[in-house]
């Protein structure tokens, strides 16, 4: 995208009263962001745009746009519009998909299979441990752990993925220059270095109540499924689960004691059809067909096939722990996780008990 196009995209994103749906309508009519602004009131009126929305397009705040451009100049930062081929396919297919995503970190994570993990901010110690453990194992199995950087379950999920050198994506309800909550500033920096930060909000935008449901729809929209670890009946996590249902995603929930109010939201979801989850395998058996369907085209398929064949040769007849496979194969943790997931999906490796893996020999 050239500088002029980026400038007009940023102005469109900031235009008050012009949300994703109207922006898409304008783009269909005028083809480019620059064309939208050039169309003027007569053009906007011709496609049925309400007159009370003209001002946001007629008088863009170019000073704020210049600030956005300066923010994007730093290494690792990017703007991915809905027309960009890098825009996540699953998210683009959702109703009201964000017009664009501000990103910081590794955008190559965007097409990889993701699993959303959400839950209560005031989680119990057991809930936090469950979030960390599930996130760690999912990351080791090659999935991107996606959450919202909130206190409680979200933070524990991000941390669990990072603890095993896995990959994680944090979706903000603010601009990416405003870490909320502030105590997760260091965690956000670690994710930016290893994984990816995402927001549909321009830099400088602070957290507002209405922003967090919008963040939640991105978490579910990016993911093949959403795991709710702990949730009260009033938890915002149930909103994420509702979005997931509407978007055709799998919803998973961890049960708990009937005397624990922190899991009543999970029990409600299970009664409504969410899958009761006890192990990571309960999740993988449900999303495996979706992984195969939505996996990105492998530009280096031959290289991957060669790597997979070499990895299979490191197995004997007995199950191996993840750490043992790392030592034998010499692969990086993230590369090994992805390769093991491919082999599981191909039916060549099975996850055994105790976090171990075993090769399936045929014939």
Image: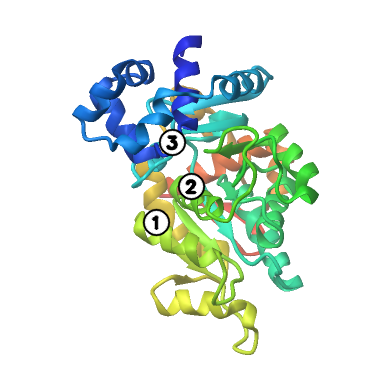
Quadrant of res 175: top right
- The residue wearing badge 3 is 88
Q: Give the x, y percent position of residue 276.
A: 49, 73
Q: Residues within 10 Å of mark 3 (few under 14, many from 20)?
A: many
Nearest the camera: 252 or 178? 178
Task: Relative to 345, say whether 85 is above or below.
Answer: above
Which disc, if any, is residue 218?
Answer: 2
Q: Give the x, y percent position of residue 4.
A: 47, 10
Label 1–label 2 contact, CB within 8 A: no
Label 1 or label 2, whichever lies nearer to me, is 2
**Residue at point 38%, 49% (across, down):** 290
In the displayed structure image, the side of residue 360 where residue 18 appears, left or right = left
Q: Residues within 10 Å of mark 2 (few under 14, many from 20)?
A: many
Which disc, if any, is residue 249?
Answer: 1
Q: Earlier in the sequence, mark 3 or mark 2?
A: 3
Q: Earlier in the sequence, mark 3 or mark 1?
A: 3
């Amino acid at each position: 995208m050239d500088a002029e196009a980026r400038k007009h995209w940023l102005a469109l994103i900031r235009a008050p009263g012009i949300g994703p749906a109207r922006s898409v309508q304008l783009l269909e009519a005028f083809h480019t962001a620059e064309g939208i602004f050039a169309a003027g009131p007569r053009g906007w009126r011709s496609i049925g745009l309400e007159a009370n929305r003209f001002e946001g397009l007629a008088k863009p705040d170019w000073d704020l746009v210049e600030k956005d451009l300066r923010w994007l100049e730093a290494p690792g930062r990017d703007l991915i519009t809905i027309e960009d081929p890098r825009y996540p396919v699953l998210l683009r297919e959702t109703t009201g998909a964000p017009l664009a995503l501000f990103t910081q970190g590794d955008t190559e994570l965007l097409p990889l299979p993701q699993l959303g993990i959400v839950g209560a901010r005031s989680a119990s110690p057991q809930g936090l441990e469950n979030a960390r453990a599930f996130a760690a194992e999912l990351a080791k199995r090659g999935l991107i752990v996606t959450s919202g950087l909130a206190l409680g379950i979200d933070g524990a999920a991000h941390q669990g993925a990072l603890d095993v050198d896995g990959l994680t994506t944090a979706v903000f309800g603010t601009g990416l220059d405003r870490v909320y909550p502030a105590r997760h500033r260091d965690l956000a920096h670690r994710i930016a270095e290893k994984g990816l930060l995402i927001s549909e909000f321009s830099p400088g935008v602070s957290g507002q109540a209405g922003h967090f449901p919008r963040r939640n729809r991105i978490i579910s929209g990016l993911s093949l499924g959403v795991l709710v670890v702990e949730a009260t009946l009033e938890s915002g996590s149930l909103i994420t689960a509702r979005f997931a249902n509407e978007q055709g995603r799998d919803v998973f929930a961890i049960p708990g004691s009937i005397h624990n109010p922190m899991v009543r939201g999970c029990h409600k979801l299970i009664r409504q059809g969410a899958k009761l989850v006890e192990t990571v395998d309960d999740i993988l058996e449900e999303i495996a067909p979706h992984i195969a369907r939505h996996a990105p085209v492998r530009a280096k398929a031959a290289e991957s096939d060669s790597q997979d064949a070499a990895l299979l040769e490191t197995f004997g007849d007995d199950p191996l722990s993840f750490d043992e496979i790392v030592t034998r194969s010499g692969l990086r943790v993230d590369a090994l996780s992805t390769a093991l997931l491919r082999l599981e999906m191909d039916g060549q490796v099975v996850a055994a008990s105790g976090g171990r893996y075993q090769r399936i020999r045929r014939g």
